Image (cartoon, rainbow, N blue to C red):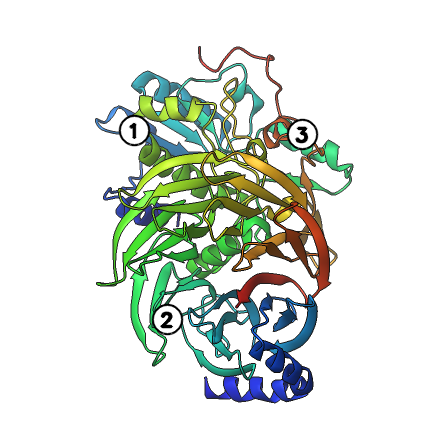
């Protein structure tokens, strides 16, 4: 669905978008500017290294490993998937522990346009949008919107655009979302869900809860690794 | 659609006595505000000379976008059912005759209509279809669909230039504004604006268009001749959630409803500086200004009321309880 929407958005402005299934060995192919993956820490680490070597963007949509953001943070890698540290902070801030878990998205969210996105997803695939589906959809959106706004689809132009302080995106989560310069992690609200007696799950909290005078960005930086705990990513 | 109109008339009978008062007041050129209520599926009528509710008119579903016809004789209300993505019997533009305060027709405009605009000659209406990714143009004399146009993703706001030539449609997911040539009924251009564009309003002279961006926390200003972005200015350093927007009749002031911030921002339309930030009811969505520019009315979705703001003092001078989840306000001369 992300790719379909990217194609439609590109058509509005006379461009084109193509989705190509890839293996890690394909990353040296000419004219590739970005790859989106994966769901396993080892593959993510290998993709991050390969992306740096070939100077193409790697959008991590499935790996939460803190090590990918801090110790092994690569300059061409951006993390749409929340980190383990963000999940831990969200759970701690919610005050719920026993059976609760934190997630990037829930198919029953309604506010801030989440209902429209969930309805579009359900109509396209006949099932609820999961966190993994949201991160993949959002990664595609970040790429097409960045290439339109940066007027380039080269990996370096995209990286520079994503690192710019004024760059932000709408992920149907209400707050403007942006990438941290120090760990290339997407700032985003998380949702705490608890199981229901009938075997489902329901959202019981949205984190962070912003203070009266706190900016969106400052509040979102209370989830995950704070600034100063690592050198700027890959530099 | 026939059954919708009949049902609405039955409801009208219940409020006929109060509406008689309203009609006679209308004859003395008193003005009325019409408030669409998304939750209670009706339209609240407020007499602006007394700021009292003088009637309530039921419609067949969630009432959202609301506009007055250029000749002031009709009120158009976007009505939708609770089922997105399918064209239900309630999905329509309901047309209220101001003199009789009756729903006189309901025209289909595709699925889930939310916002729309009417051409200055009163002959055509352009509506956004959020879940369909389209905009629908209809002929208001016949109710016939003239065109269904592909615009951006999650179309929302619709504005028409004062000369009637251009219809602008904002799309919330693609962060775009599509330009429709109303002569050819074709999309002739697209512009990227700030995040989650909600509402587009032309300046009275038509040279500029203002687009609120709910997630961007800003207003984008478009040069309508060159279709270039003149400026994107943040409200409250980007921490505002701008949705509805009204421009003063002299074009000097913008009144921007802050949605989840529960505020109304008053902005100088030339310098883009915020002149005042006014606490109103909860989640102000729609906003309208009286033709003389003296008062602004906001529809407050979560406090089920309307705030009245005096534009000379920039203070709230009154609050009027309306239906459930008020969405928009339209003011008739």
**Relative to A118, residue A84 above or below:** above
The reply to whether dot 3 and dot 2 touch (C-beta < 8 Å) is no
Residue B85 in view here: yes
| Tag in front: 3 or 2 | 2
Estimate the x, y position of residue B70 in percent, counting from the top left: 42, 68
Residue B193 in view here: no
The reply to whether dot 3 and dot 1 touch (C-beta < 8 Å) is no
> Do callouts 3 and 1 point to residues on the same chain?
yes
Residue for point 23% across, 44% down:
A14
Indicate which disc residue B96 carries. none
Mark 2 lies on residue: B122
Mark 3 lies on residue: A214
The reply to whether dot 1 and dot 2 touch (C-beta < 8 Å) is no
| Tag in front: 1 or 2 | 2
The 10 Å Cα crowd at callout 3, few under 14, some 14 to 19, many 20 or more, is few
Mark 1 lies on residue: A33
| Tag in front: 3 or 1 | 3
Estimate the x, y position of residue B139 in percent, counting from the top left: 33, 74
Q: Secondary structure at mark 3?
A: loop
Residue for point 48% across, 75% down:
B74
Q: CA distance from mark 1 to mark 2?
A: 49 Å
Chain at numbered mark 2: B
Chain at numbered mark 1: A
Estimate the x, y position of residue B19 in percent, counting from the top left: 64, 82
- Quadrant housing residue B60: bottom right
Residue for point 59% across, 61% down:
B327
Estimate the x, y position of residue B315 in percent, counting from the top left: 69, 47
Q: CA distance from mark 3 to mark 1?
A: 36 Å
């Amino acid at each position: 669905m992300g790719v379909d929407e990217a194609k439609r958005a590109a058509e509005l402005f006379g461009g084109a978008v193509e989705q190509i299934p890839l293996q890690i060995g394909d990353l040296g192919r000419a004219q590739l500017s970005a790859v989106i993956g994966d769901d396993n820490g080892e593959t993510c680490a290998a993709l991050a290294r390969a992306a740096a070597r070939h100077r193409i963007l790697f959008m991590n949509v499935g790996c939460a490993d803190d090590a990918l953001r801090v110790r092994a943070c690569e300059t061409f890698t951006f993390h749409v998937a929340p980190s383990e540290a963000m999940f831990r902070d969200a759970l701690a801030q919610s005050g719920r522990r026993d059976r609760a878990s934190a997630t990037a998205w829930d198919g029953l969210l309604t506010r801030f346009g989440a209902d429209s996105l969930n309805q579009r997803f359900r109509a396209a695939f006949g099932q609820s949008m999961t966190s993994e589906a949201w991160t993949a959809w959002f990664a595609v959106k970040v790429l097409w919107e960045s290439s339109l706004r940066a007027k380039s689809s080269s990996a370096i132009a995209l990286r520079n655009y994503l690192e710019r302080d004024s760059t932000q995106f709408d992920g149907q989560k209400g707050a403007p979302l942006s990438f941290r310069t120090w760990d290339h992690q997407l700032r985003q609200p998380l949702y705490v869900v608890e199981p229901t007696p009938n075997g489902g799950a329901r959202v019981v909290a949205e984190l962070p809860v912003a203070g009266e005078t706190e900016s969106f960005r400052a509040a979102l930086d209370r989830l995950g690794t704070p600034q100063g705990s690592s050198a700027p990513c890959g530099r | 659609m026939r059954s919708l109109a009949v049902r609405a008339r039955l409801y009208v009978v219940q409020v006929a006595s109060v509406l008689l008062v309203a009609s006679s007041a209308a004859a003395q050129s008193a003005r009325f505000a019409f408030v669409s209520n998304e939750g209670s599926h009706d339209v609240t009528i407020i007499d602006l000379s007394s700021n009292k509710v003088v009637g309530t008119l039921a419609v067949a579903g969630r009432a959202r976008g609301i506009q007055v016809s250029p000749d002031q004789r009709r009120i158009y209300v976007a009505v939708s059912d609770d089922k997105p993505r399918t064209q239900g019997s309630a999905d329509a533009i309901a047309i209220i005759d101001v003199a009789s305060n009756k729903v006189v027709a309901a025209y289909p405009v595709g699925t889930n209509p939310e916002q729309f605009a009417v051409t200055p000659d009163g002959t055509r209406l352009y509506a956004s279809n959020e879940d369909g990714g389209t905009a629908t143009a209809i002929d208001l004399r016949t109710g016939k669909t003239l065109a269904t146009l592909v615009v951006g993703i999650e179309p929302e706001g619709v504005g028409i230039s004062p000369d009637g030539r251009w219809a602008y449609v904002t799309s919330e997911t693609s962060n775009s504004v599509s330009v429709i040539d109303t002569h050819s009924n074709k999309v002739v251009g697209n512009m990227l604006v700030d995040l989650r564009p909600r509402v587009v309003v032309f300046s009275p002279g038509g040279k500029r268009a203002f687009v609120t961006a709910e997630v961007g926390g800003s207003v984008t200003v478009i040069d309508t001749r060159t279709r270039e972005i003149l400026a994107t200015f943040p409200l409250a350093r980007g921490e505002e959630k701008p949705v509805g927007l009204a421009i003063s009749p002299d074009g000097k002031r913008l009144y921007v409803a802050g949605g989840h911030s529960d505020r109304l921002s008053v902005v100088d339309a030339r310098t883009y500086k915020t002149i005042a930030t006014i606490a109103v009811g909860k989640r102000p969505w729609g906003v309208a200004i009286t033709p003389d520019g003296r008062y602004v009315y906001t529809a407050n979705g979560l406090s089920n009321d309307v705030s009245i703001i005096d534009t000379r003092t920039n203070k709230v001078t009154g609050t009027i309880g309306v239906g459930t989840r008020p969405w928009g306000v339209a003011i008739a001369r």
